[in-house]
Image (cartoon, rainbow, N blue to C red):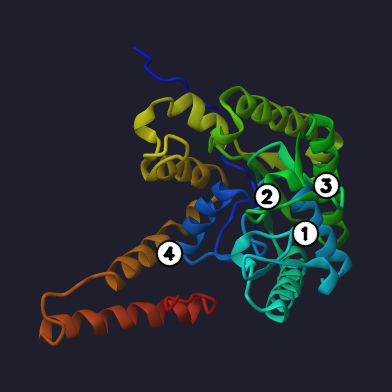
């Protein structure tokens, strides 16, 4: 008896290992995958502009990074005692305008550097809904809690999303012809937009990426990982959602991570990943008696494991 529909998956040829360099951009779902890769000490750069929900904001970041188009005073604004950029998440906002500009421009440099050396670039789209600044007529990455009447809300058409994805891929290829580009759609439900509106949004994203997969770009190391479909078809039960009934819970994310790992993470990394996991668990261990001989022996053993691992993988950092 079959009690579950299963999304067909196959392992990719050019998988992620500990020599790989990964850039992750997009919605909060990409940070879920990114946190797993970081936990296992893979080489990653994750959302240097913070969470970006739609394709045009990701397109803007990549274009500015490649063109080295730095931010200046005219590109930021002050409200609620902080300086903000309409192109970045509020995580980058700061009471100091100078520090915000420095952080924005450093993020552009970091993005460009990672784009040029990345072996894998993961892009997750969260929504097709965007907000346009009435004054500038520009679509923003984040409204930073400004009054709603300063924006108009628009639904990007599938053709618009497809066009921005094509620009993203084209710009990536200007500096990196070899990286595998992995497109995904976030399984997070944007119910604040409305139930029907959320479905329309996801449908536009699915349609746009479907067109990319059918185009010539699909033969240029561009592929799709069905995170959205895994959530809807294999985990179609509210027990896999967090309390807000919007975000996948930790069990769902672990499940999707295992699927992603099967498709995109090399089996040759399993032994190292197991060692990293043992170290991470050891670092979180809370002893009954910190000064006990047993605990000191445990710490010495842990230090030796870390030193041995870092000797081969010098980029690993267990202090963060």
Question: Where residue 38 sits in the image (x, y, percent)?
Answer: 50, 63
Residue drawn 11% across and 86% down?
Answer: 293
**Residue corresponding to mark 1:** 61
Which of the marked residues, 2 or 1, is nearer the chain's N terminus? 1
Q: In this view, does 109 lie above or below 239?
A: below
Q: What element carries label 3?
A: loop
**Callout 3: few (<14), some (14-19), or many (20+) C-alpha neighbours within 10 Å?**
few
Q: What element carries label 4?
A: helix
Which of the marked residues, 4 or 1, is nearer the chain's N terminus? 1
Q: What element carries label 1?
A: helix
**Callout 1: few (<14), some (14-19), or many (20+) C-alpha neighbours within 10 Å?**
many
When asked about the image quadrant of residue 8, the answer is top right
Q: Which of marks 3 and 4 is in front?
A: 3
Residue 253 numbered tag: none
Asked if labels 1 and 2 touch by Cβ distance under 8 angstroms, the answer is: no
Question: Where residue 156 sits in the image (x, y, percent)?
Answer: 78, 34
200 displayed left or right of 9: right
285 displayed left or right of 240: left
In this rendered view, identify the residue nearer to me: 268 or 99.
99
145 displayed left or right of 63: left
Residue 134 numbered tag: 3
**Residue corresponding to mark 4:** 272
Q: Is residue 67 above or below residue 185?
A: below
In this rendered view, identify the residue nearer to me: 269 or 43.
43
Which of the marked residues, 3 or 2, is nearer the chain's N terminus? 3
Asked if labels 2 and 3 touch by Cβ distance under 8 angstroms, the answer is: no
């Amino acid at each position: 008896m079959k009690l579950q529909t299963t999304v067909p998956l196959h392992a990719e040829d050019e998988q992620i290992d500990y020599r790989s360099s990964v850039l992750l951009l997009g919605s909060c779902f990409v940070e879920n995958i990114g946190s797993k890769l970081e936990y296992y000490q893979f080489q990653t750069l994750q959302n240097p502009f913070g969470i970006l929900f739609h394709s045009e904001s990701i397109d803007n970041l990549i274009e500015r990074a490649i063109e080295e188009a730095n931010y200046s005073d005219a590109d930021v604004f002050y409200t609620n005692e902080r300086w903000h950029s309409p192109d970045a998440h509020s995580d980058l906002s700061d009471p100091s305008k100078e520090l915000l500009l420095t952080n924005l421009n450093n993020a552009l440099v970091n993005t460009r550097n990672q784009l040029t050396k990345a072996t894998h670039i993961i892009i997750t789209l969260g929504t097709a809904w965007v907000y346009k600044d009435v004054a500038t007529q520009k679509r923003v990455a984040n409204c930073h809690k400004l009054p709603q009447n300063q924006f108009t809300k628009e639904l990007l058409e599938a053709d618009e999303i497809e066009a921005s994805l094509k620009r993203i891929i084209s710009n990536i290829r200007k500096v990196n012809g070899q990286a595998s580009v992995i497109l995904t759609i976030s399984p997070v439900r944007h119910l604040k937009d409305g139930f029907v509106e959320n479905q329309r949004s996801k449908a536009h994203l699915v349609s746009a990426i479907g067109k990319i997969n059918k185009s010539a770009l699909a033969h240029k190391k561009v592929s799709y990982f069905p995170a959205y479909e895994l959530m809807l078809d294999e985990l179609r039960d509210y027990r896999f959602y967090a309390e807000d009934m919007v975000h996948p819970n930790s069990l769902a994310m672990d499940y999707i991570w295992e699927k992603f790992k099967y498709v995109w993470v090399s089996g040759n990394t399993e032994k190292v990943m197991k060692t990293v996991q043992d170290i991470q668990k050891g670092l979180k261990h809370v002893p009954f008696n910190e000064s006990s001989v047993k605990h000191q022996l445990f710490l010495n053993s842990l230090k030796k494991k870390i030193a041995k691992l870092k000797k081969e993988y010098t980029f690993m950092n267990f202090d963060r």
